[in-house]
Amino acid sequence: MPLNKETINVVKSNAFQVLERVDDLLSLSNWEKKYLGKKGEVVNITKQVCELNSVERPIIGTLINDLKQELSIAAQKRKQELATRTPSSHSVPPGTFFDLTAPGKRVPLGHLHPITQMRQYAEDIFIRMGFEVHETREVDDDYHNFESLNMPPQHPARDLWDTFWTENGLVCITHTSNMQIRILTSKSIPIRAIIVGRCFRNEALDARHEHTLHQIEGLYVDKNIKLSDLIGTFKKFLDEFYQRDVKIKTQPSHFPFVEPGIEFLLDCSLCQGTGIINKDRCSTCGGNGWIELAGAGMIHPNVLAEAGLDSQKYSGFAWGFGLDRLVMMKYGIEDIRHFNRGDLRFIQQF
Ligand code: PHE
């Protein structure tokens, strides 16, 4: 299109139309760029002036200069208007102090479930201790939940877990140990990992047993790792979790994927380890004053071999503890079934 008076008018009316809609300083600066900038519309038409004949050139040149001036004045005016306009109800009065470190406003949508709160709390402790956090999957195959853990098909130890199977032969994971082999094969040594997630068991329910529970698995592999490292690490975590010097004991146990296997027990906080509440047997610990918290042990050489690790060179420990029980002991909750009941009177206490 040849450059003439008409073209200049089109640019001008467009520019003014857009400027009317400019409502903040950022859009204004974009507008200035578009019309008055180095690659803007005005420069664009100025470049075409040299193609005109000597009669048109001065006339059109003057018109472009006028346009440029008019647009600059209009932009200046708009800038002043924007800077001095009366604040809307959303804007902040001048001189208002912003505390950028203030916590956000709570959305009135309830709060995190106590298990979620304590899961985050426990994860933070492990992160400070140098562990990496992994999440488990909730449905898995037989290989990961059992076979890779030194339990071939038909192995009687599988009966330790009352398993929910899906119709197509998968397992609703019975423990977070299902992730062990994945971590052992994908991470390089030293391995320090925790695995967190929900597990499912087809159990007879009582104050200590639920069909859906939360576990935190610990996995540690390096050179020269000993049982005392396992006990020390786990005790350190519990001390942090309960913010006191906890009383624990260990006893021998059997899990096919560890050797030797142990169990950690914590003194029951509901009966202060006496086994009796109001002359009755404490139903939370079953009356013996101790509550079973975790299965643990030194990773079995067969499991290390399954992961391609040389058990002559490396050793490690693993544990799996029930987060629900840990939280029960922290808050003196007498029945594990409260967690999944959805009773607001219970949930609102946390
Ligand atoms: N996976 C076992 C359970 O759920 C606990 C465990 C984990 C035992 C790791 C030993 C080592 O019962």
Image (cartoon, rainbow, N blue to C red):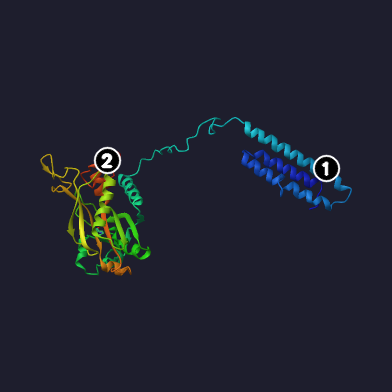
Q: Is residue 292 left or right of residue 305?
A: left
Q: Residue at x 78, y 51 (%)?
A: 47
- SS under mark 1: helix
Quadrant occupied by the C terminus: top left
Is residue 212 visible to us here? no
Residues under numbered marks 1 and 2 in contact, where contact means CB atoms less than 8 Å apart: no
For label 1, the residue is: 62
Q: Using the image, determine if residue 217 lies above or below residue 155.
A: above
Number of marks: 2
Q: Is residue 47 left or right of residue 210?
A: right
Along the line of sight, the residue nearer the viewer: 342 or 125: 125
Checking the image for residue 190, the label placed there is: none
Question: Picture coordinates of residue 290 (x, y %)?
Answer: 17, 49
Question: Picture coordinates of residue 69 (x, y %)?
Answer: 76, 39
Q: CA distance from mark 1 to mark 2?
A: 81 Å
Checking the image for residue 346, the label placed there is: 2
Along the line of sight, the residue nearer the viewer: 289 or 208: 289
Q: Using the image, determine if residue 81 lies above or below residue 316.
A: above
N-terminal label among 1 and 2? 1
- SS under mark 2: helix
Q: Is residue 267 left or right of residue 124?
A: left
Q: Amino acid at mark 1?
A: Thr
Along the line of sight, the residue nearer the viewer: 124 or 41: 124
Is residue 234 visible to us here? yes
The answer to whether the residue bearing label 2 lies less than 8 angstroms from the nearest atom of ligand 1 is no
